[in-house]
Structure formats: C-alpha cells, structure tokens
Amino acid sequence: MIQELIMFIVGLALLIKGSDEFVEAGCRIAKGFGVSEFLIALVLASIATTLPEVTVSAIAAYEGNSGIALGNAVGSALANIALILGVSGLIMPLKVDEIAWRNSLFMLAVTVYAWFLMRDMVISRFEGLSLVMIYLCFLYYLYKKHIAFEEVGDGRSRNVRKDVVILFLSGAVVVAGARMVVTSAVTMARTLGIPEVVIGLTLVSVGTSLPELANSLAATLKRIPNISVGNIVGANILNILMVIGIASMIRPITVDVSIYSFTMPLTLLVMGILTLSLRLTNKVSRATSAVLLMIYAYFLYSQF
C-alpha cells in the first residue's frame, strides 16, 4: 500500500512537471511561429494543462478501467470550476472580457451533449469520434476568427527546433506519470475496497487538475483573470470533448450510474452558475465562488 502511494505521488509529480515544461515550450513555439497571444491563452495553455487528463483517461480506457477513464474527465471538469475557480475567485473577484460567457456557454452545451450520449450507459467509439470532431471544428473556428501572424525575428526562430524537442520529451514524461497514477490508483482502490469510479472522480481528477490549479492561482495573483477563467473554460471543453472522446474511441466506455445520475447533473449545475454569472456581470464574484466551493464540498461528502 505504501509503495502504491509513493508511486501515485511520484506519478503526479511527473505529470505536473512534465505539463509545466510542455506549456512553456508550447508557448515559445507559438510565439516563434507568430501565433496570437489570445490563441495561446485560450487553446494552447488549456491543451497543455489538460494533457494529464487525456493521458490518464486514455491509458485507463485501454486497460479497461472505465470508472477511472470517465470519472477522471468528469471529476476534473467539476473540480476545475467548483474547486479551482472557487478558490481563485475568493482570492480576488475575476473580472473578464465579454467573450468569456460565450465560451462558457459552448462548454455548457457540449457537456449537455455528452450527458445525452450517456443515456444508454455506454459511450461508443462512434459517439467518442463525434466529440473529437466537435473539438476540431471548435479549433477551426478559433483559427479563422482569432489567429494572427506577426513578424518573427531570427533569434526566436533559431530556438524553435530546441523547443519542439522539449515539447516531445515533456509529453513523454506526462505519459509516464499518467501510467503510474492509473496503476497505483487502481491498486489502492481495490485494496481499500473503494469503487474505482470514486477514486477517478476524486483522487485522480483533483491530482490531474493540479496544473490548472497552479496556472489559475498564478494568473489570479498576477491580476490576469482572463487567463485564469479562460484556461479553466478551455480545459473543461477539452475534458468533455477530447478526454472522453479519445478514451471512448480506444475502448467503448461503460458509464457508472452515479456519474450519469449525480456527477454530470452537478457538473452542469456549476457550469450553469458560471455561465450565468459571466453573462450577467462578466465576472466570478466572491459570493459565486463561495457557492461553487460549497457545492464541491457537498460532492466530496457524498462520495466518501
């Protein structure tokens, strides 16, 4: 048991460090190729910080652990808003641009669609493909609407090759860490008699959300709330579309009844609260953050 716990902690450390290097290298590459800062914040940062969720759920699906594969994705989406934005918003009210609520509305819509796919308690490969295709269409829309090209200096372009190597190496570290997390989590779940879905919804999902937590807290403390909120919304869109989509394409996912009837409705509730708050006030206030944290506390209580 102690060995599995050590493996879990080491795996999480690799996930966090690998993701951190990945996002930094990715940002440098984006700037080297002249991609707009907006696109970096909205897409690249969220892709990098969601890499642990993607790899954990993909490996869990391959090994037949549907509870962790789906529980990690849904639990991370819930933790990102109710826990991470809740904590960040308590530190400082998060005032954001008007476009934020539109992205949040899209996040809510795709989550409703994913919930609809779960109605027969299975997410098939074809349904997973539809989720991935929606995300690719979303990326294309962002590319057409927001991408911009800038003049790239020779000094920056010379470092792009090095950053590409760092990107791939850090990605390999994330995959290795993810495998350690999945293996140790399943072993601990079976040893303690705790259902794997509960471990996936709590321990694994919060652990793989640590990169988002670090990024959002850093952005909040630096008074850049657009990055804090944008990273979370982008990460959740990825969690629902790509994490669930890729995992179910690897192997059809059997949906646990507690995810369909309890966790997904709760996730939709916090997404609805966030979207409404952004629509009405363009910010996440301390009062809204307190409500989100209370909902997450209730979720943890219900699981254990």
Image (spheres, helix red, strand yellow):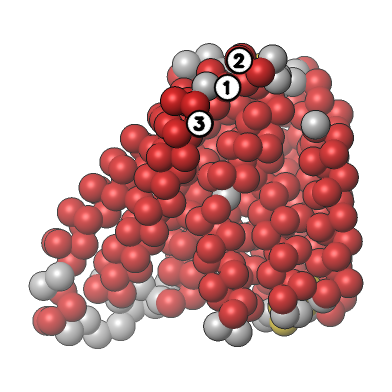
Residue 98 sits in quarter: bottom right
Tag 2: residue type? Thr
**Foreground residue among 192 and 239:** 192
Look at 46% across and 62% down and name the residue there. 45
Task: Using residue 258 as the reference point, say whether residue 162 is left or right of it.
Answer: left
Say above or below: 230 vs 77.
Answer: below
* Disc marking residue 5: 3
**Foreground residue among 161 and 221:** 221
**Foreground residue among 215 and 99:** 215
Tag 1: residue type? Met
Say above or below: 260 vs 147.
Answer: above
Tell me the residue that label 2 is attached to: 191
Measure the alpha-carbon separation of dots 3 and 2: 12 Å
Disc 1, SS: helix
Task: Tell me whether the residue at label 2 lies in contact with that at label 1, contact meaning CB atoms closer than 8 angstroms.
Answer: yes
Task: Tell me whether the residue at label 3 lies in contact with that at label 1, contact meaning CB atoms closer than 8 angstroms.
Answer: yes
| Disc 1: CA contacts within 10 A as few (<14), some (14-19) or many (>=20) | many
Tell me the residue that label 1 is attached to: 188
Measure the alpha-carbon separation of dots 2 and 1: 5 Å
Tag 3: residue type? Leu
Q: Is residue 137 visible?
A: no
Look at 43% across and 61% down and name the residue there. 44
Disc 3, SS: helix
Residue 247 position in % (x across, y down): 52, 28
Residue 251 position in % (x across, y down): 52, 18
Residue 30 position in % (x across, y down): 32, 68
Look at 41% across and 76% down and name the residue there. 36
